[in-house]
Image (cartoon, rainbow, N blue to C red):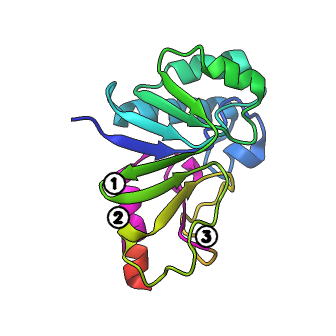
């Protein structure tokens, strides 16, 4: 049985120290290599992975090569660095299932809104059970705290920065949200 994973903000080839240094890397080449290694050590070829935007910057040729080296069936949600040109490039990859703007996903009775940007999906429904609410899974902020926006709504950050430079199981993300709510 295949698994479903989620992540965002790979930023392959983004050669700026404010991206790779907070992630614990000395340079962008080390970052690219470790992200691919972490990914391919976790993911199987029949797994589905939702990448919530910002795949690559600067060197589209090398970025595309790295993207094609990732295991699994990739579902890409557009981020602010995913230009129309990159959108077209993503659609040439054999391992990419879809490239879309955002996605509602019903999973094991949970309602998820997958987007690059944090989105408020609740409407004074804090008293409802988690399965009756919509959880926003997002990236964009490069935060190390997946709960940084929980004071604004049911918003959980999945970017690599918050998850040790690796994708996380969707089940883990949902359990993490559930545990957070139970602690409150």
What's the mark number on residue 175? 2
Camera-nearest residue between 150 and 11 = 150
Mark pair 1, 2: CA separation: 6 Å
Q: Marks 1 and 3: which is nearer the front?
A: 1
As helix, strand or loop, the secondary structure at mark 1 comes to helix
Tell whether 89 sits left or right of 180: right
- Residue pictured at 52% horizontal, 35% vertical: 35
- Of all residues, the one furthest to the left in this rendering is 1
Query: Mark 2 and mark 3: span between their CA atoms?
Result: 17 Å
- CB contact under 8 Å: marks 1 and 3: no
**First in sequence: mark 1 vs mark 3:** 3
CA distance for labels 1 and 3 = 20 Å
Give yes or no for residue 177 being in the magenta stretch: yes
| Start-end of magenta stretch | 153-178
Picture quarter containing residue 76? top right
Against 49, is 128 above or below? below
Instruction: State the quadrant of the C terminus.
Output: bottom left
Q: Which residue is mark 1?
A: 171
- Determine whether label 2 and label 3 are within 8 Å by CB: no
Q: Circle 3 is placed at which residue position?
A: 148
Residue found at x 55% / y 16%: 93
Secondary structure at numbered mark 3: loop
């Amino acid at each position: 049985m295949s698994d479903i994973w989620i992540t965002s903000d790979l930023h392959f080839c983004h050669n700026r120290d404010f991206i790779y240094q907070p992630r614990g890397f000395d340079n962008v080449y080390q970052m690219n290599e470790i992200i691919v290694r972490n990914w391919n050590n976790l993911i199987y070829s029949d797994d589905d992975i939702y990448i919530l935007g910002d795949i690559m910057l600067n060197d589209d040729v090398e970025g595309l090569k790295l993207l094609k080296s990732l295991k699994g069936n990739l579902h890409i949600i557009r981020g602010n660095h995913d230009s129309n040109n990159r959108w077209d490039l993503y659609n040439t990859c054999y391992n990419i299932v879809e490239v879309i703007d955002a996605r509602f996903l019903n999973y094991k009775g949970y309602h998820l809104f997958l987007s690059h940007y944090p989105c408020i999906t609740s409407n004074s429904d804090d008293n409802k059970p988690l399965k009756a609410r919509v959880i926003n899974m997002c990236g964009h902020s490069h935060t190390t705290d997946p709960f940084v926006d929980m004071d604004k709504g049911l918003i959980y950050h999945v970017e690599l920065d918050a998850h040790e430079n690796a994708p996380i199981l969707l089940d883990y993300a949902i359990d993490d949200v559930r545990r957070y709510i139970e602690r409150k």
